């Protein structure tokens, strides 16, 4: 079976076997259920909800309802719901999930939603929402990555911010030795597979690697082997928050007990919002301390469930959301993210959060974690690769041997 179609077929089978959603009542009014893990983020979730829920003031015939799903369970939960021809009306779709949903016919084409003015306001980030010639998602946010740190904790340890990978490991060890706190934290567990893949791609890209080139998989390239080796070295350093999932180590950073992290701007914004222990002005940031300046990015799109019985109202909401005023509200809530229009966050936000320009500057050098040429198979390949990386971390497997196994297994999917 063609690799590009494999994963989507799994969802298509589920859709075919689904029991069906009830009769359509597509009147353009009523309740719209909106799925997003960000509703669970303290502070920012409320601000985002205010931004999207502002539509109800312009159209009282429509109400919006949150469907909040934990990030690590997001794709699997939606796959189950949509596979049964149910699920939310509107959903945020991670870029690594978009091809699978689109090829399975689970996303409503959106080409007829925006008027000429709306389309003219869009930027190039929306191009990734076009699959097989159809616009199936509009850019919600593109989130970039950087290294950032708790300045007070580094000062306490007498550590300068690192500028290369050996310096990163050395700084993490010194922080651990001098303060007793983890010097570094990053996702590293298979139970967070989907977001870990996006985070882990920073290491591949930062060491000059890629997951494919010219239509061929490059999982076991020397650059990727170097990236996995570096990741293992940090994991085994004794200075990393091993065993903590993202929720846990982010809470620790928020509490001032983690020195440095590689994470995205949205996560950092949530950690410092209203934080008096680690205020935003107490956070420093720099590009990733890796040999190349490249980094990963997390792209998220707004889509409409093809099985929604209220698609007319959902499209009306979408048309409104890409207007100037809602985009300004969204930019204020999403902070350092790049939106689907060129709307920027308020100047006072950037002043209050001095790390924002570092993340914004990385936009020109960042790449998503969707494997070029293997878009719909990315989840299957992701699982193969990260399973092997986990063997390196937990079982002591050799990075080159592990990635060679992953390369061989992924190629057999063809």
Image: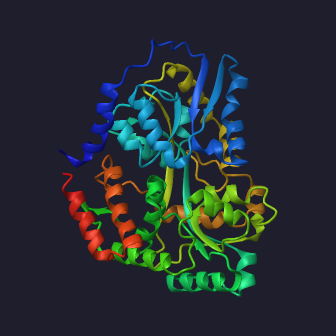
- Viewer can see residue 216: yes
Q: Which residue reaches farthest front?
A: 395
- The residue sitting at 26% across, 74% down in the picture is 401
Is 157 on the left-hand or right-hand side of 119?
right
Question: In this rendering, is residue 36 above or below 82?
Answer: below
| Residue in front for this viewpoint, 367 or 202 | 202
| Residue in front for this viewpoint, 411 or 124 | 411
Q: Quadrant of residue 407?
A: bottom left
- Viewer can see residue 136: no
- The residue sitting at 69% across, 52% down in the picture is 345
Is 42 on the left-hand or right-hand side of 17?
right
Residue 103 in the image: state x and y as whole percent. 32, 37
Question: In this rendering, is residue 346 above or below 242?
Answer: above
Please say which color scheme the image uses. Answer: rainbow
Is 374 on the left-hand or right-hand side of 79?
left
Q: Which residue reaches farthest right?
A: 276
Quadrant (top left/top right/bottom left/bottom right) for the N terminus: top left
Question: In this rendering, is residue 339 above or below 188?
Answer: above
């Amino acid at each position: 079976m063609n690799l590009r179609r494999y994963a989507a077929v799994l969802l298509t089978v589920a859709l075919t076997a689904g029991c069906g959603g009830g009769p359509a009542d597509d009147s353009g009014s009523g309740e719209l259920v909106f799925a997003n893990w960000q509703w669970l983020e303290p502070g920012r979730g409320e601000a985002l909800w205010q931004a999207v829920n502002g539509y109800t003031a312009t159209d009282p015939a429509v109400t919006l309802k949150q469907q909040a799903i934990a990030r690590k369970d997001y794709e699997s939960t939606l796959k189950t719901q949509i596979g049964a021809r149910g699920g939310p009306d509107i959903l945020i779709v991670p870029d690594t999930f978009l091809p699978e949903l689109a090829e399975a016919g689970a996303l409503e084409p959106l080409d007829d939603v925006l008027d000429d003015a709306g389309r003219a306001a869009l930027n190039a980030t929306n191009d990734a929402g076009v699959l097989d010639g159809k616009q199936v998602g509009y850019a919600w946010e593109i989130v970039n990555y950087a290294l950032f740190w708790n300045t007070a904790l580094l000062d306490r340890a007498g550590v300068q911010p690192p500028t290369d990978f050996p310096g990163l490991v050395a700084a993490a060890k010194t922080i651990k030795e001098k303060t007793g706190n983890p010097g570094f934290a990053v996702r590293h567990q298979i139970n967070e597979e989907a977001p870990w893949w996006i985070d882990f791609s920073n290491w591949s890209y930062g060491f000059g690697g890629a997951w494919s080139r010219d239509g061929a998989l490059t999982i076991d390239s020397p650059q990727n082997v170097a990236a996995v080796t570096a990741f293992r070295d940090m994991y085994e350093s004794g200075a990393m928050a091993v065993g903590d999932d993202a929720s846990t180590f982010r809470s620790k950073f928020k509490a001032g007990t983690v020195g440095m992290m590689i994470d995205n701007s949205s996560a950092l914004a949530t950690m410092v919002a209203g934080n008096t222990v680690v205020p935003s002005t107490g956070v420093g940031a720099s590009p990733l301390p890796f040999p190349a300046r490249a980094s990963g990015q997390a792209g998220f799109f707004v889509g409409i469930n093809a099985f929604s019985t209220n698609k007319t109202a959902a499209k009306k909401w979408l048309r409104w959301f890409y207007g100037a005023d809602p985009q300004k509200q969204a930019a204020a809530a999403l902070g350092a993210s790049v939106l689907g229009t060129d709307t920027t966050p308020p100047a006072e936000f950037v002043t209050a959060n001095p790390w924002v320009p570092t993340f914004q500057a990385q936009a020109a050098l960042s790449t998503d974690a969707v494997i070029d040429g293997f878009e719909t198979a990315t989840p299957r390949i992701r699982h193969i690769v990260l399973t092997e990386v986990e063997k390196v971390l937990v079982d002591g497997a050799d990075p080159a041997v592990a990635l060679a196994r992953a390369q061989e297994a992924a190629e057999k999917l063809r």
